[in-house]
Image: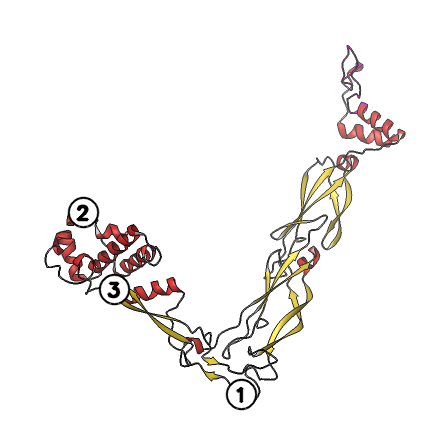
Amino acid sequence: MAESKRDYYEVLGVGKDADDAALKKAYRQVAKKYHPDMNPGDVEAEKKFKEASEAYAVLSDPDKRRQYDQFGHAAFESGAGGGGFGGFDFGGADFSDIFGDIFGDLFGGGRRSGRAGQGPMKGANIRKSVRITFEEAIFGCEKELDVILKDPCPKCGGSGAKSGTSPETCPKCGGKGQVVYTQQSFFGMVQNVQTCPDCHGTGKIIREKCADCGGTGFVSNKKKISVSIPAGIDNGQSVRIREKGEPGLNGGPRGDLLVEVTVSRHPIFQRQDMHIFSTVPISFAQAALGADIKIKTVDGEVIYNVKAGTKTDTKVRLKGKGVPSIRNSQVRGDHYVTLVIQTPERLSAEAKEALRRFDELSGNTLHVVSGGDNRSGNAGAGGKKKKGFMNKMKEAFDD
């Protein structure tokens, strides 16, 4: 009954203003999802497939769509004498292109031209990996890799056929490299183009194979390939070397060699994009009084002046000491250094006494005096003003 049918636009999941391209795309998705060959034995899927096909048959036809928009399902309740599902007439709908695509997806075929299999085809890419140091990644380097590459067989000249013989035209595909299969669908016979299984798309059959290459036309050789690693490359990135991969077919170019780079960890430096990070320890005296310290960078050691009164975890920036841009080696990131004040673990008796003296001059005491004030250095008799922290510390180290 018409009352039990869903709205055709709802079935395809489109709005009433959908154009022909949107209708076709929507129907293809629904038809592929619920096609009986994708859901064998699923009655509900078959029902939805028929429902979608009926909806597309109406909405893809301008006259039928106009009638449906005006009268709904009632427009087709009478005179349904044609073929199709449930007496519905599908004669006005063009399903050939859509079902060619669907059957190509379902059965592995492709909608290619009849002689596409004989055209030049680029060879497959080869993947290799190489490990480099942190410094090599920063400044670039040259590496040499051992790669197994295929070359045309010198004995048969790449034909794959035994000396004195030659490949024959494939009788199954007639030299086209592809065969056409006809399959039954709900809408009749559908043609599907697939690669010829006998010649694998070459269009040729080798009756007597070359003993050296086994009929492949290629022999494998070990070769050394030089790889230029650009400055600034990061871990996991790849370098592409053109036409150093597998040989092409039918005169096509070789594939490429893709070299994936693994960068070893550095004991001091860490990298983030174009910036380098490290931590440098300094003594309490250097932090308090200020001092020139040496900081290691990828360019070597640099002298940095620590300002007096520097606190631990202070971050400083060494401009232009980071990673070069992989696109422009003249552009570099920065090196960020975290200054960490270290507490000495082993002190001589003299050093310990100096620290005690310093502690007293700073207005503190190492031991809490029972019943007394554990602070010292306050303004005493005579109203002398308390000395500044830096002056006291300098006096302690001068003593």
The answer to whether residue 14 is visible is no
Q: Position of residue 102 (x, y in %)?
A: 34, 62
Residue type at the position of mark 3: Phe
First reached walking from the N terminus: tag 2 or tag 1: 2
State which tag comes first along the sequence, 1 or 3. 1
Q: Residue at x 18, y 47 (%)?
A: 4
Question: In the image, residue 341 lies at what x, y percent?
Answer: 74, 36
What is the distance, in whole Å, between disc 2 and disc 1 at their CAs?
Answer: 69 Å
Q: For this view, does 241 lie left or right of residue 183?
A: right
Give how far across and how far down residue 43 sits, in percent: 29, 51
The span picked out in magenta is 360-381
Residue type at mark 2: give it.
Ser
Mark 3 residue crowding within 10 angstroms, few (<14) / some (14–19) / many (20+): some
Residue 290's label in the rendered image is: none
Mark 2 = which residue?
4
Residue at the disc numbered 1: 165
In terms of image quadrants, where is residue 148? Answer: bottom right
Name the residue that disc number 3 marks. Answer: 187
Image quarter in which the C terminus is found: top right
- For residue 344, side relative to residue 97 (left or right): right
Between the residue at mark 2 and the residue at mark 3, the CA separation in whole angstroms equals 24 Å
Indicate whether 20 appears above or below 277: below
